[in-house]
Image (cartoon, rainbow, N blue to C red):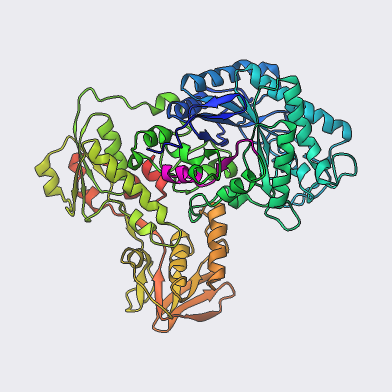
């Protein structure tokens, strides 16, 4: 099964056991001083054991502090870091994979909190888009020095036992800045023509080949297009790829450039493999291997890419965060056992917003210390009763079964999933169904008894007399205390979505501007209704992951959804919603139907009835939050 995916392949003189590569993803798991930590080693060793052919270690800092690009980033700017990096490479090799180091310099994109008060550097003093800060232009001498820093970093990677390096030349970082006419306004031999703008990167590749060895593979994570007007186009990407092949590069790993942040950290609505066209276009221009990346979540999709000749290798990033054993499961034909990444971007929130260690909604072991991830078999197996078949209840059942307990799960509905079945209804959220599909496969395999359509009460629990009771009854809609909430024109968002109610040509007012309200608005607007969202505060979707929030708000705008902020809902009337703005003026927002989307509260009635059992109450039954809170 998946024969092409598991054929050996070569990048230069390096032979990989299959066509699967782990893409570099920052983890914030290194020591604060840039040293390799036990957590970092465990993270990569786990994925090597999982069966991937090559692991590309994240975002390695090649010149501190100006090239620092993360809160806890591994460093390679001094020989003192070689022993720790050797431990990491050895662990990857022991797991059965090859190891590459991604060499990174952010240039003007450096976070000021990382570079210790220095001014970011760039090819030219062009204000950076995110905040208007003007970087310091590198002098000619400094450009030559930075080329040398890349070469020395590659030399250290080689001496540490890494099998290859990958040059980060996309995502708006320093090499991308040299390549793009938007950020490179230099008048010397490193600016102007395509040949001159490529010179910095070409000299790095040539320098590594000259000083480290021609047999040491150099891969390039190349900007294929900038996604900005006046920036690099696919034709530029093809030209640069050809030039790099001439310079001795061993593989091209194309991706987006200066303007593609949402496009490379895709939120959930993006379809699988949509970025693969970049690899297909670059492959037309070169004879060296090309690596495809971007929302590749399932083995069949990866196999199709290779069989169609769009790429020679497939890179998995977030897919391997969610399930390190993705390759082994695919090779064994156990597709249903793969915990498919849903694109919720909790990992992005952790790394890019909070400077926190990597985390994952579906894989609670991510970012934790090795000893916290070991599931030891129970010395005395117990009879465990779990009430509720949502994500928390299903994960509790899985873990308890893995520890050797006898588990019975009861769900009052006729299907597993709980609120996942509601959350998966709005447009673009269908991947949430993957979570339920995974557990529906895994729990029976682990011997969990699943009882669907069976509500639980205290009497039934007493009759079953379990050793342990886990209450995972989830949440129920929070109904605001507003005059008119019980009117015939009022709907509750969760019920509307659960019943997949459909309307056309009606006016809706949604009370609540959080994720529930905005996604319900999208659901209704795409059916051809006029929708207004009412929010008390100025900020919309404050708790939503930023890239998805931007995507969602853009979608709402395209569908004509009106967002009315800084209004207090005073009453629901037959003709609409009475609101008061901050000036004290009252008006009616006209609506045929009003939808309550004020979130949820714990469904904890059963908890009170089961006090004698001292139940373990988890997730939304304690406080409604996110999937990651339910599963971790």
| Drawn side of residue 143 relative to residue 589, left or right | right
Give the residues in magenta: 287-305
Is 407 placed above or below 483 here? above
User: Residue at horizontal 71%, vertical 53%?
Assistant: 233
- Measuring from the top left, give residue 117's x and y in whole percent: 76, 36
| Residue 294 located within the stretch drawn in magenta | yes
Is the C terminus in the top left, top right, bottom left or bottom right quadrant?
top left
Residue 226 can be seen in this image:
no
Q: Farthest residue toward the right?
A: 187
Q: Nearer the viewer, residue 497 or 257?
A: 257
Q: Nearer the viewer, residue 495 or 92?
A: 92
Q: Where residue 566 sits in the image (x, y, percent)? A: 56, 68
Which residue shows up at 62% across the image and 31% down it? 73
Q: Nearer the viewer, residue 115 or 254?
A: 254
Query: Total of numbered circles in the picture?
Result: 0
Q: Is residue 379 above or below residue 420?
A: above
Q: Is residue 577 magenta?
A: no
In the displayed image of the protein, which residue is found farthest to the left?
A: 463
Image coords of residue 419 (percent x, y) = 33, 55
Residue 61 found in image quarter: top right
Quadrant the N terminus occupies: top left
Establish if 272 lies above or below 470. below
- Vertical side of 370 occupied by 172: above or below: below
């Amino acid at each position: 099964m998946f024969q092409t995916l598991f054929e050996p392949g070569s990048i230069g003189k390096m032979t990989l056991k299959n066509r699967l590569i782990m893409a570099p993803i920052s983890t914030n798991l290194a020591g604060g001083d840039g040293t390799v930590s036990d957590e970092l080693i465990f993270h990569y060793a786990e994925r090597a054991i999982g069966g991937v052919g090559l692991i590309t270690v994240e975002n390695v800092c090649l010149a501190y502090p100006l090239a620092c690009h993360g809160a806890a980033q591994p460093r390679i700017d001094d020989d003192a870091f070689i022993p720790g990096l050797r431990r990491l490479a050895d662990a990857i090799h022991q797991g059965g994979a090859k190891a590459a180091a991604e060499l990174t310099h952010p240039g003007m994109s450096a976070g000021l909190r990382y570079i210790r008060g220095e001014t970011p550097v760039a090819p030219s003093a062009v204000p950076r888009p995110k905040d208007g800060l003007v970087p310091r232009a590198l002098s000619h001498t400094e450009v030559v020095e930075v080329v040398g820093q890349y070469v020395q970093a590659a030399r250290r990677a080689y001496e540490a036992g890494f099998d290859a390096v990958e040059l980060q030349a996309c995502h708006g970082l320093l090499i991308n800045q040299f390549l793009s006419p938007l950020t490179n306004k230099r008048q010397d031999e490193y600016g102007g023509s395509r040949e001159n703008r490529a010179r910095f990167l070409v000299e790095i590749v040539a320098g590594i080949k000259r000083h480290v060895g021609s047999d040491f593979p150099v891969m390039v994570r190349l900007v294929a297009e900038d996604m900005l007007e006046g920036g690099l186009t696919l034709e530029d990407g093809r030209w640069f790829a050809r030039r790099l092949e001439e310079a001795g590069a061993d593989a091209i790993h194309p991706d987006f450039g200066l303007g593609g942040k949402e496009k490379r950290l895709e939120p959930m609505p993006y379809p699988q493999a949509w970025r693969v066209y970049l690899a297909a276009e670059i492959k037309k221009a070169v004879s060296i291997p090309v690596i495809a990346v971007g929302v590749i979540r399932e083995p069949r999709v990866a196999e199709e890419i290779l069989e169609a000749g769009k790429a020679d290798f497939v890179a998995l990033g977030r897919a391997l965060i969610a399930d390190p054993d993705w390759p082994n499961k695919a090779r064994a034909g156990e597709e249903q056992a793969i915990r498919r990444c849903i694109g919720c971007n909790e990992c992005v929130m952790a790394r890019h917003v909070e400077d926190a260690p990597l985390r994952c909604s579906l894989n609670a072991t991510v970012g934790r210390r090795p000893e916290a991830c070991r599931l030891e078999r129970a010395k005395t197996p117990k009879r465990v009763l779990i009430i509720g078949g949502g994500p928390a209840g299903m994960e509790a059942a899985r873990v308890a079964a893995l520890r050797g307990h006898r588990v019975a799960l009861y769900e009052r509905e006729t299907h597993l999933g709980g609120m996942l079945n509601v959350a998966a209804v709005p447009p673009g959220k269908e991947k949430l169904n993957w979570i339920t599909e995974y557990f529906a496969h895994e729990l029976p395999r682990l011997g969990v008894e699943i009882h669907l359509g069976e509500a639980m009460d205290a009497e039934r629990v007493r009759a079953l007399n379990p050793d342990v009771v886990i209450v995972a009854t989830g949440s129920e809609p929070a109904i605001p205390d507003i005059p008119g909430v019980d009117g015939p024109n009022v709907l509750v968002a969760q019920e509307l979505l659960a019943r997949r109610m459909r309307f056309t040509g009606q006016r809706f007012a949604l009370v609540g501007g959080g994720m529930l309200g905005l996604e319900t608005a999208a659901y209704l607007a795409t059916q051809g209704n006029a929708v207004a969202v009412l929010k008390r505060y100025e900020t919309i979707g404050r708790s939503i992951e930023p890239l998805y929030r931007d995507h969602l708000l853009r979608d709402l705008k395209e569908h004509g959804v009106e967002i009315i902020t800084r209004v207090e809902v005073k009453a629901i009337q037959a003709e609409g919603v009475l609101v008061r703005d901050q000036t004290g003026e009252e008006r009616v927002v006209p609506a045929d139907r009003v939808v309550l989307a004020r979130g949820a509260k714990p469904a904890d009635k059963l908890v009170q009835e089961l006090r004698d059992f001292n139940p373990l109450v988890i997730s939304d039954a304690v406080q409604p939050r996110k999937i990651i809170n339910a599963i971790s």
